[in-house]
Image (spheres, rainbow, N blue to C red):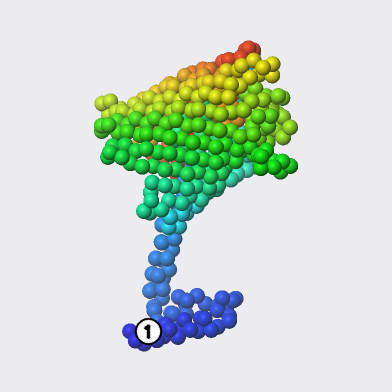
Amino acid sequence: MGRRMAALAGVLVACWASPTFAGEGSKSLDELLVDKGVISKDEAASVQGRKFAAWVDRVTFSGDLRLRDEGFWRDPASDRHRARFRLRLASELNIRDLTVGIRLASGTGEQLSTNQSFDDLASQKGLWIDRAYLRWQGASSKWLALTGGKMPNPFFTVYSSDAMWDEDVNPEGFAENLNVAFGGSGNLFVNLAQIVLDEDSSGSLSTDQWLFGQQVGIALEPMKDAKATLAATYYNFVNVENNNFGQVTCNPGNTRTSACTSPTAATGVLLNDYNVLDVTGHVGVKAGGLPIAVMGDYLVNTVGPTDGAGNETKDNGYQVGLILGKAGEAKTWEIAYFHKVMGTDATVADLADADFGTGGTDRRGDIAWAAYNPSKAVQAKVKFYNTEKLSPGQDDVKRLQADLVVKF
């Protein structure tokens, strides 16, 4: 043992003393230890294997591929049909209390969708940065998480919350999430976020568009297989009146000073401000082993929006429905029905669900779907929308989506 320690010390001194140790042609420390007879080749390989395994244990990879066939039937506009795919590749790297999250996704660069249509004579499709964030959560302070970057939605949401948030929106900014358990059967949570909507390079700090969100909620489990959650969120949009966000695409519905066309740099300017109160409720139970989820969202824009003539516009909206079953594990299924009404200026249409009719607000209708998982990794789903416009002018839209999703 003494000879090995002396040899190891000599190798380390030589490593520090040699100016070429890190240069071209230098050997690794493991190789030098083998050359000096301190360790064997098998021992060196074992050390390298353990180092590699430790690094791999800190990284997780995941993703999914979705194939979609989609049809539109519109009255009085023309019908439409398209085939699409969605590819998402995600990874998380854990460094003690820090998590680095990255996700790449297909799409066209818009905030509301990662879908890519089969189009343009099979031309190549692009991958975009869908998420890039850093999260801190201390081992001794699991009740607090701090996140910054292009991140997953930091607020408590359920399916009905797409009245406010399209599921593909990944906000950019900062978030603070607090979760405190009490009574052994419940928890109180507070979610805060400071979200950058658009930065005006020719403006100032007082003209940039921001969203400040504050959510308070409570989750209870009064008995086995029963859980209820209620949350209230106030979304304060700043400097959005008489502005737009320079986004790639926009959803229809809101009152605007000009129609929204692509690119949106000088079009789609919002006439109103938006300070939105959103109340979300969710109850989940099991009846005879069958999962049942009832949920709903109610939104109201508290600023009292108006049209160009000063008349009040519809400032509220809601979505309510239920899901029977839960498609997730192998040989599981679910069916669902939801009813949604979205007033013209209930919320910012450019963040709301893009699949409801033609997307956004100023629309009401029904949503139904059925899904089945033959295995945990594979799901087949059929979803149908039947919607109509709220404001004058007919625009009935029926939309049918058939999806095949593989998760990995």
Image point (64%, 12%), residue name: 393
Q: Residue 105 versus residue 360: which sits nearer the camera?
A: 360
- Report the residue at 42% width, 43% height from top: 178
Q: Residue at x 26, y 26 (%)?
A: 288
* Image quarter hosting the N terminus: bottom left
> Relative to residue 7, is residue 146 depicted above or below?
above
Counting every numbered tag in the picture gives 1
Image quadrant in which you'd find residue 274: top right
State which quarter of the image contains the C terminus: top left
Q: Position of residue 101 (x, y in %)?
A: 50, 49
Judge by depth and name the residue closer to the eye, 21 or 312. Answer: 312
Which percent across, then down, holds residue 257?
70, 24
Q: Tell me what residue is drawn at x 45 percent, y 33 percent.
A: 157
Confirm whether residue 378 shows in the render: yes
Residue 44 in the image: state x and y as whole percent: 41, 73
Residue type at the position of mark 1? Arg
Mark 1 neighbour density, 10 Å: few (under 14) some (14–19) many (20 or more): some
Q: Quadrant of residue 282?
A: top left
Counting from the top left corner in percent of width and height, residue 396 is at 58, 15
- Residue 64 versus residue 299 in the image, above or below: below
Above or below, 44 against 380 in this view is below
Residue 186 lies left or right of residue 60; in this view the side is: left
Foreground residue, 152 or 10? 152
Side (left or right) of 234 relative to 260: left
The image quadrant of residue 182 is top left
Instruction: Check disc 1 and report its element: helix, strand or loop.
Output: helix
Q: Which residue is mark 1?
A: 4
Q: Can residue 262 be seen in the rendering of this structure?
A: no
- The front one of 294 and 400 is 294
